[in-house]
Image: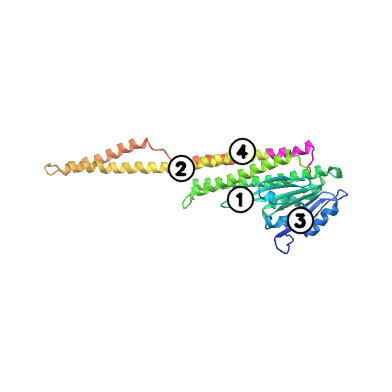
Amino acid sequence: MYIGYFSHSCMLKTVSIAGIEEQGVPFKKESIALDEAAQSAVSVGNLTWIECVVDDIVTETPKILKKLGIQMDPKVLLSGYVSAYEDAGDTLGIMLPFIVTGDSRTQTSPVLIFMKKDLIVTIHDDYGGKITKLYNYSNSLMRKLPKESEQWAGRQTILLFRLIDEVSETNFSSLRTIVEQAEQLEIDLAGSRQAERDVGFEISNMKRSLLTFLNAVWATHDTVRSVKFGDPDMLSDDDDILEKFEVILGRLDRQIQMAENVMDIISTGITIIQTETSNKLTKLIVWLTVAATAVLVPNTVATIFGIPDLQLSWSWVAPILVISTVISAIVTYRFTKQFSVNPFGSKRLQNIGKKFRRK
């Protein structure tokens, strides 16, 4: 990520712009002051994309919008659940979630997109690095956009599509991270690193991460549908251009399906662990039963032989005790074994890993 301009409050980290000049030539300026970006947006007279990275979205967004002359209260978007969509006629506001996956939890961070005629503003924190990477390729991106002034709606609609698509692809990579964590857990369970681990806690974290992912993707899906079918004034009415959003909706549908499949596999893993624990307890009970019976039968026989009035010789009492112990242990083991189930071994865990890798 590039080094940015710091405001006096050290909250606005960087401002960069890209766009198309009146002659149809793409341009971009990195790490400039917000005042310069606002002046450029007015003077260019064609599509301008202003990219802002901040420390605190809630605090800095109103200042940025005021400086750029965008009349929309960001609280309307930020008060939404994960994502939001607001059409104010000459201004369109969208909030989408970035999914951030760490070692122990998964959370979302918002990216705000504001649109006016010939102006798109994106505001996010450091988690929006993918948007920054898209900005790095802005010159080639701008060359592919319509240049005619009357096609301003088509230009910014296509750019909005690329922005949303980049967010969607970034979020999909977090699902791969969750799957990799599940695969590593499977490898550890099948190997020698099982000791000193709270497997239930780790699987619970994976399920929470998947639920966060699903909530974010569903919310993004709803917002994209609102963008396509809401008929905002700031977007094109061209069906061919709007059809691009169907591509995003199709990808989001596949992401939801894959996440649900992974959730099923993790739930199966929980069942396997519970069954394995139950089987180990069953085996322990079997051996305790065998041991108890092996002691109980000869103890009973010895008690009988210990009656004072019986005159018995140890030469044949001892063999009887030994034989009765062996027979009782064998009979008890053969009887109780039918109720035990062999615990799931590494082959079953390997099969789960193969399911992960096929997703």
Give me the C-alpha separation between circle 4 and circle 1.
20 Å
Q: Which residues are magenta?
A: 235-249
Give me the C-alpha separation between circle 3 and circle 2.
57 Å
Q: Which residue sits at x=33%, y=35%?
A: 335
CA neighbours of label 3 inside 10 A, class few (<14), some (14 to 19), many (20+): few
* Residue position for label 4: 257
Q: Which residue sits at x=69%, y=39%?
A: 249
* Residue position for label 3: 66
Mark 1 element type: strand
Mark 3 or mark 4: whose residue is earlier in sequence = 3
Mark 3 or mark 1: whose residue is earlier in sequence = 3
**Of 214 and 68, which appears nearest the observer?**
68
Figure colour scheme: rainbow
* Residue position for label 2: 274
**Of 353 and 252, which appears nearest the observer?**
252
Question: Main SS type for the magenta part?
Answer: helix
Is residue 226 found inside the magenta-colored segment of the image?
A: no
CA neighbours of label 2 inside 10 A, class few (<14), some (14 to 19), many (20+): few
Q: Position of residue 60 (x, y in %)?
A: 71, 57
The label nearer to you, 3 versus 4, is: 3
Q: Which mark is residue 343?
A: none
The label nearer to you, 3 versus 1, is: 3
